[in-house]
Image (cartoon, rainbow, N blue to C red):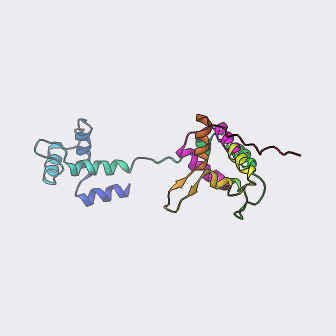
Amino acid sequence: MKEIFDRLITEGLSPNSFYILYCIHNKVTPNKLVSSSLEITKLKAGGYLNENLELTNNSLNFIQEIESYFKKSKKKTSSILMGDEFLSKIAVYNEIFPNRKLSSGKYARVNIKTLENSFRWFFENYSYSWDVILKATEKYVDEYSIRRYEYMRTSQYFVRKQNTDKTWDSELATYCDLVENGYDEETNYFKETVV
């Protein structure tokens, strides 16, 4: 609250002056306890109102700035973003990946807490269901299992990976899109082991 009063003082406005600006902006009749004529005179002199008692750009910007102090940024919980049983879904997702080291030297499976943060980002940016995510992951791992997991991403980097230009990339989103929109299944003649 102190920040608001400091801003009013910096701008040379009283709380009553701001109240009048607010009333004009929202087309509300001011309360009789505030001397409207006195405050309007001050606001005209300060460049907040023109001669037709219309708000200037300066006053519109200031009102918007003050209103921004009252907007609450509510951080969504993991349950809200990913559903109530998100931890068990993440565990199922992680189990799809092989329990081994990849050719990159990193383990294919990453701890659940790290995955939770990655999936928070994923659900904030994409709207795929857990069913689609799990099918897409199975498709991805199946494709790389044929090549003995060569160049496969870890369970974390499959969800999101930061590029050199600081943007984020999601291979999972690509595979989810393939699952949702259908994909041409390539015929692989060497998938079965012949004895």
- x, y (%) of residue 61? 27, 50
- The answer to whether one can see residue 77 in this image is no
Q: Is residue 162 magenta?
A: no
Seen at 26% across and 61% down, the residue is 10
**In the image, 163: left or right of 116?**
left
**In the image, 150: left or right of 41?**
right
- The answer to whether one can see residue 162 in this image is yes
**Observer-nearest of 51 and 190:** 190
- x, y (%) of residue 90? 69, 46
Query: In the image as oriented, which residue stretches furthest toward the bottom?
Result: 105
Query: In the image as oriented, which residue stretches furthest toward the right?
Result: 195
**Observer-nearest of 4 and 33:** 4
Q: Quadrant of the N terminus?
A: bottom left
The quadrant holding residue 152 is: bottom right
Seen at 50% across and 46% down, the residue is 74
- x, y (%) of residue 140? 68, 46
Query: In the image as oriented, which residue stretches furthest toward the left?
Result: 51
Q: Is residue 128 magenta?
A: yes
**In the image, 109: left or right of 25?**
right
**Would you say the magenta stretch is mainly helix, strand or loop?**
helix
**Observer-nearest of 13 and 97:** 97
> What residue range appears in magenta?
113-138
- x, y (%) of residue 156? 65, 54
The quadrant holding residue 25 is: top left
Number of numbered callouts drawn: 0
